Each structure stands twice: as structure tokens, then as C-alpha cells.
């Protein structure tokens, strides 16, 4: 396992252990990582912001 894989493994584990972090975002991030679409901090932030914005829009409907 390479360094990047180890970093993401720890990252996902910490997110899963955080009770305040939505599991749906963790799953989306994992899928994007596995497909090679997430390789940077900026992309992770885009996903988190996008899911959060969609969630708050849906809650307001």
C-alpha cells in the first residue's frame, strides 16, 4: 500500500468515527476515491460543500 492510500484510509476511518459527519458524504468520498476522481484536498472540499449545500436545500423544501 502506498502512502496516499494509507493517508486516505486513515482519513476515511476518522470521518466514519466522527458522529457529526454524515455517512452519506463518507460513502460518496470513498466512491470517488476508488474511481480515481479524488486526488486532492480541493476536490474533497468541493464534494463536502456540494453535499452539504444539497442537503440544506432539501431540508428547506
Image (cartoon, grey):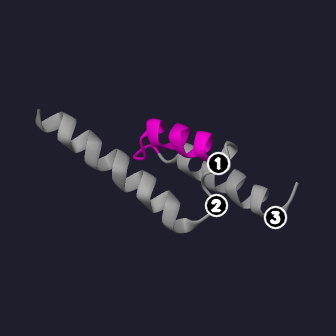
Measured in 3D between alpha carbons, the distance from the residue under mark 3 to the one under mark 1, in whole angstroms, is 14 Å
Image coords of residue 25 (percent x, y): 46, 42
* Mark 3 residue crowding within 10 angstroms, few (<14) / some (14–19) / many (20+): few
Q: Name the quarter where the C terminus is drawn.
A: top left
> Which of pointers 3 and 1 indicates the residue nearer the eye?
1
From the image, give the main secondary structure of the stretch colored magenta.
Answer: helix
Q: Which mark is residue 3?
A: 3
* Mark 2 residue crowding within 10 angstroms, few (<14) / some (14–19) / many (20+): few
Instruction: Name the side, left or right, on which 9 lies relative to 15.
Output: right
Image coords of residue 58 (percent x, y): 20, 35
Question: In what element is the residue under mark 1?
Answer: helix
* As drawn, 29 above or below 8: above
Residue at 64%, 48% (x, y): give it: 33
Residue occupied by mark 2: 39
Find out whether the residues at labels 3 and 1 contact each other: C-beta distance under 8 Å: no
Image coords of residue 59 (percent x, y): 18, 35
- Front-lying residue, 9 or 34: 34
Number of marks in the image?
3
Measured in 3D between alpha carbons, the distance from the residue under mark 2 to the one under mark 3, in whole angstroms, is 13 Å
* Magenta stretch: includes residue 20: yes
Q: Which residues are magenta?
A: 19-32
Residue occupied by mark 1: 33
Instruction: Name the side, left or right, on which 44 lies relative to 58.
Output: right
- Name the residue at the left extreme: 61
Find out whether the residues at labels 2 and 1 contact each other: C-beta distance under 8 Å: no
* Magenta stretch: includes residue 24: yes
Amino acid at each position: 500500500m502506498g502512502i496516499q492510500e494509507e493517508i486516505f484510509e486513515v482519513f476515511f476511518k476518522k470521518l466514519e468515527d466522527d458522529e457529526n459527519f454524515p455517512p452519506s458524504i463518507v460513502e460518496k468520498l470513498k466512491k470517488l476515491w476508488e474511481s480515481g476522481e479524488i486526488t486532492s484536498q480541493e476536490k474533497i472540499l468541493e464534494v463536502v460543500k456540494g453535499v452539504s449545500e444539497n442537503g440544506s436545500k432539501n431540508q428547506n423544501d
